[in-house]
C-alpha cells in the first residue's frame, strides 16, 4: 500500500463543512483511495472510495487531484456525531490476505 | 438492513476455555474477514473468506479457527483461550458489486481472557 500523510487533528464547528486532506504522492495507477473512520469504542466505518474521479455518497464527498497525489474528504455539514478518527488508505484491489492499515489518521473534533 | 452483526458484544473467559464468536451480514457480500484490535494498535487480520466455501489465513491465525457456514455467516472459534487473545474482535464484509468496494465492519466483540 502507498504511504499516506494526514494532519493529526482538526477542529470543525457543527453545521460547517469539514475538509480533511490526505497526501499520497507515491500512489500507483491501480490503487484506489479509501476513507474510513472510527468512533471511540466502535467498529471502523467505511465512508467512500475513488480512483480518479470525484465521488459523492450520502455520507461525504471525495475530491482527488488530477495527478492523484492528494485527496480531500468533505463532510458537508458536520455534526457532533462526526467526531472520530478519520483514516485515508491507498490500496489496490484484491488485497484480501492483508489487513487494512489505518495509520495514525486525523482526529476530527466537531464542537457546537 | 442490519449490516454486519456480531455476538456476543462482551465475553470473559478463563484460560483454556473455548468459545465461538458469531458474525452475520445481510448485504449479500461474498468476502468476509475477522480482525483483532488491541488498545492503541491497528487492525490485524486473523482469517478471511473470499467466498462461500473458502477460508484463508491472515496475518495472525494461530490459536483460531473459522467456519464460513454459508454466504451470510462467518464464525471465529477460540479452542483454548489464552490471555494474549484478550482483544476487541471485528468482523467485516466486502461487497462485490464493485470489486474495489470498501469493507463494512460489525460493532465488535470485547473479549477478556483471565
Image (tube, coloured by chain):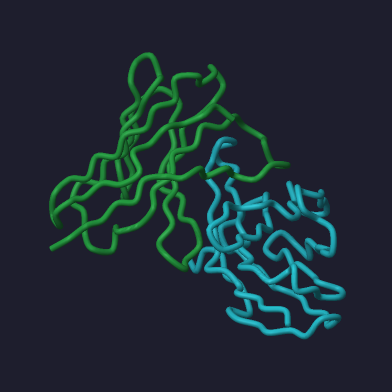
Chain colours: A green, B cyan
What residue is at 71 percent from the left and 59 percent from the top? B71
Q: Position of residue B58 (x, y in %)?
A: 76, 48
Q: Is residue B101 above or below residue A112?
A: above
User: Can you give x and y, in whole percent of width and height, for residue A30 in the image?
Assistant: 56, 21
At x 42%, y 32%, the residue is A5
Q: Is residue A79 left or right of residue B46?
A: left
The residue depicted at 51 percent of the width and 32 percent of the height is A90
Position of A25 with respect to A28 (left or right) is: left
Q: Quadrant of residue A68?
A: top left
Q: Nearer the viewer, residue B101 or A110?
A: A110
In this rendering, position of residue B38 left or right of residue A19: right
Residue at image location 81% in from the left, 75% down from the top: B81
Judge left or right: residue B14 versus residue A105. right
Out of A70 and A30, give the one closest to the viewer: A70
In the figure, A87 relative to A50: above or below?
below
Which of the image's four quarters has the N terminus of chain A?
top right
Quick check: A107 above or below A97?
A: below
Residue A39 in which image quadrant: bottom left
Q: Nearer the viewer, residue A109 or B46?
A: A109
Q: How many marks?
A: 0
Please tell me whether residue B40 is drawn above or below residue B83 in the rendered image: above
Pinpoint residue A112: horizontal percent, then vertical percent.
Answer: 13, 63
Check the image and name the residue furthest to the top.
Answer: A67
Q: Position of residue A75 (x, y in %)?
A: 25, 46
Amino acid at each position: 500500500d502507498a504511504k499516506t500523510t494526514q494532519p493529526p487533528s482538526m477542529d470543525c464547528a457543527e453545521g460547517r463543512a469539514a475538509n480533511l486532506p490526505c497526501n499520497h504522492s507515491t500512489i500507483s495507477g491501480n490503487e484506489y483511495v479509501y476513507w474510513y473512520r472510527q468512533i471511540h469504542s466502535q467498529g471502523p466505518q467505511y465512508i467512500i472510495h475513488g480512483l480518479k474521479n470525484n465521488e459523492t455518497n450520502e455520507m461525504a464527498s471525495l475530491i482527488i487531484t488530477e495527478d492523484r497525489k492528494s485527496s480531500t474528504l468533505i463532510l458537508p455539514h458536520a455534526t457532533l456525531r462526526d467526531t472520530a478518527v478519520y483514516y485515508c488508505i491507498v490500496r489496490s484491489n484484491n488485497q484480501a490476505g492483508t489487513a487494512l492499515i489505518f495509520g495514525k489518521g486525523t482526529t476530527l473534533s466537531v464542537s457546537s | 438492513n442490519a449490516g454486519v452483526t456480531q455476538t456476543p458484544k462482551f465475553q470473559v473467559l478463563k484460560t483454556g476455555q473455548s468459545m465461538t464468536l458469531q458474525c452475520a451480514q445481510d448485504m449479500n457480500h461474498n468476502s468476509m474477514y475477522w480482525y483483532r484490535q488491541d488498545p492503541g494498535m491497528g487492525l490485524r487480520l486473523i482469517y478471511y473468506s473470499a467466498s462461500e466455501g473458502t477460508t484463508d489465513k491472515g496475518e495472525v491465525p494461530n490459536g483460531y479457527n473459522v467456519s464460513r457456514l454459508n454466504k451470510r455467516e462467518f464464525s471465529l472459534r477460540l479452542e483454548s483461550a489464552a490471555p494474549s487473545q484478550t482483544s476487541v474482535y471485528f468482523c467485516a464484509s466486502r461487497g462485490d458489486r464493485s470489486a474495489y468496494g470498501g469493507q463494512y465492519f460489525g460493532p465488535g466483540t470485547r473479549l477478556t481472557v483471565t
